[in-house]
Amino acid sequence: MLNPALIVEVLSPSTEAHDRGFKFARYRELESLREYVLVSQTEPRVEKFALQAGRQWVLSEYVGLEAVCRFESVGCEVALADIYESVRLGGD
């Protein structure tokens, strides 16, 4: 990774705590990073942490297949229905 503005992690039960904790803390040290996104494997849920003034990180949650997540750092938006199009949810 060289100067990422956006990092997206797909959560798994075995790595979720690490992704939310230690890994996110290390990523916040990157001057270029503007958004950190966590994508659930078990339900249609995307959590976006966006950098605000004063180096504050603000959480926005997008839940349900009708939700649309906007990624300001790269100028695009993605419907959760598209993210989860071929995903079997709920461990089925």
Image (cartoon, grey):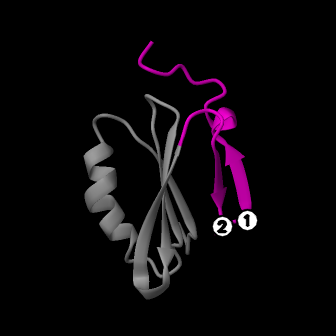
Q: Residue at x 44, y 77 (%)?
A: 30
Q: Mark 2: few, some, or many residues within 10 Å (few <14, many ≥20)?
A: few
Q: Amino acid at mark 1?
A: Gly
Q: Which residue is labeled 2 in the image?
A: 72
Q: Give the vertical position of 60 relative to 1 (above or below).
A: above
Q: Give x and y (percent) for residue 17.
A: 26, 47
Splitting the image into 4 quarters, where does residue 24 fall?
bottom left
Q: Give x and y (percent) for residue 52.
A: 49, 78
Q: Give the vertical position of 19 relative to 66 (above or below).
A: below
Residue 71 covered by magenta stretch? yes
Q: Give x and y (percent) for residue 36.
A: 48, 61
Q: Secondary structure at mark 1?
A: loop
* Marks 1 and 2 in Cβ contact (< 8 Å): yes
Q: Residue at x 64, y 60 (%)?
A: 71
- Location of the C terminus by quadrant is top left
Q: Give the vertical position of 48 relative to 78 (above or below).
A: below
Please, which residue is most extreme toward the bottom here?
54
Pick the front one: 14 or 76: 76
Q: Residue at x 73, y 65 (%)?
A: 75
Splitting the image into 4 quarters, where does residue 25 fall?
bottom left
Measured in 3D between alpha carbons, the distance from the residue under mark 1 to the one under mark 2, in whole angstroms, is 5 Å
Magenta residues? 63-92
Q: Which mark is residue 75?
A: 1
Please, which residue is most extreme toward the top here?
92
